[in-house]
């Protein structure tokens, strides 16, 4: 490899690392609510903050746009995506449907390491104090991604994105979002069904639980909204 080609390879790798760092930072700021819906994103400011050129910034912003976390216009201005009630209902419906189906596919393929991980997640749910939504949600995320883990990488990535999107709604609608604490009894039963390789029972238990939770969330955020699609 020539010196010029080697230098180009190093530059491409460095820019790729910069793009990933920018993506991770902006995404974390959006998910935590530090960047509220509608906030403008300056390419120049991001480049200065991260000590890089605009190339990695554009790459990171395009990835965030693909995640539907930001929007871009023809003049290359980017803003944090707004949140709409219809989007929340869609995210709940998609999570309900996709996790339920993924459980049916994944459970017959799970083994002892997955069972242990499910039990650990349930234990964390049980340990979470009532009102500690963040701790419960983190345990739920691990549980969901573990029990769906054998459904395929793309399915797991889709489910992770749906879980994140609902977290973003909670952060930005905190004053209206109901307390998302549900103990662990339902998940203990789901984990036991998984150990028995009963994918049908595990999927049905999850669907019943998440259907109730989704109805609670929508009723808290918008009491007058008719959640006909969820029903």
Image (tube, rainbow, N blue to C red):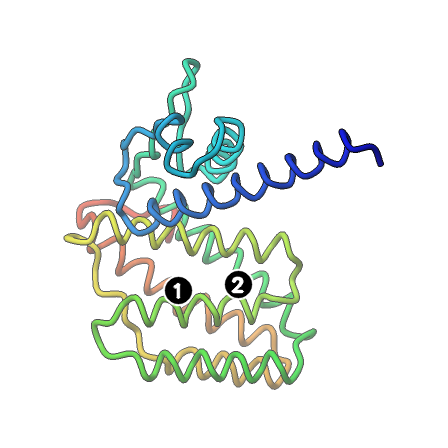
Q: Residue most toward the top?
A: 75
Vertical order, 31 against 216 (above or below):
above
Closer to us: 54 or 137: 54
- Identity of the residue drawn at 40% across and 46% down: 25
Dot 2: within a 10 Å radius of its alpha carbon, few (fewer than 14), some, or many (20 or more) residues?
many
Residue annotated with mark 1: 210
Residue annotated with mark 2: 100
Q: Residue most toward the left?
A: 175
Label 1 close to label 2 by CB (< 8 Å) = yes
Vertical order, 227 against 115 (above or below):
above
Mark carried by residue 107: none
Image quadrant where residue 108 sits: bottom right
Task: Provide residue 109's location: percent of width, then percent of height.
Answer: 69, 74
Mark positioned earlier in the residue sequence (1 or 2): 2
Task: Provide residue 30's location: percent of width, then percent of height.
Answer: 34, 44
- Identity of the residue drawn at 64% across and 81% down: 197
Q: CA distance from mark 1 to mark 2?
A: 9 Å
Left or right: where 130 falls relative to 29: left
Closer to us: 72 or 176: 72
Secondary structure at badge 1 equals helix
Image quadrant where residue 76 sits: top left
Task: Provide residue 128's location: percent of width, then percent of height.
Answer: 30, 79
- Identity of the residue drawn at 34% across and 55% down: 167
Left or right: where 217 falls relative to 188: left
Task: Provide residue 69's location: percent of width, then percent of height.
Answer: 40, 39
Left or right: where 118 falls relative to 227: right
Dot 1: within a 10 Å radius of its alpha carbon, few (fewer than 14), some, or many (20 or more) residues?
many
């Amino acid at each position: 490899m020539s010196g010029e080609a080697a230098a180009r390879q190093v530059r491409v790798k460095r820019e790729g690392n910069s793009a990933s760092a920018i993506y991770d930072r902006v995404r974390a700021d959006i998910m935590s609510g530090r960047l509220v819906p509608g906030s403008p994103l300056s390419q120049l400011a991001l480049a200065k903050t991260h000590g890089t050129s605009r190339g990695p910034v554009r790459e990171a912003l395009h990835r965030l746009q693909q995640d539907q976390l930001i929007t871009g216009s023809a003049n290359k201005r980017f803003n944090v995506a707004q949140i709409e009630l219809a989007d929340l209902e869609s995210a709940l419906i998609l999570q309900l449907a996709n996790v339920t189906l993924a459980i049916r596919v994944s459970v017959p393929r799970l083994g002892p390491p997955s069972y242990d991980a499910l039990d650990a997640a349930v234990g964390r749910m049980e340990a979470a104090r009532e009102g500690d939504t963040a701790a419960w949600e983190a345990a739920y995320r691990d549980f969901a991604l573990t029990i769906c883990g054998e459904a395929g990488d793309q399915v797991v990535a889709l489910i992770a994105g749906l879980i994140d999107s609902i977290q973003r709604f909670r952060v930005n609608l905190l004053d209206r979002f109901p307390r998302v604490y549900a103990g662990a009894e339902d998940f203990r039963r789901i984990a036991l069904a998984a150990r028995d390789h009963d994918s049908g029972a595990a999927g049905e238990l999850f669907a019943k639980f998440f259907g109730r939770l989704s109805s609670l969330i929508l009723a808290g955020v918008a009491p007058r909204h008719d959640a006909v699609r969820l029903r």
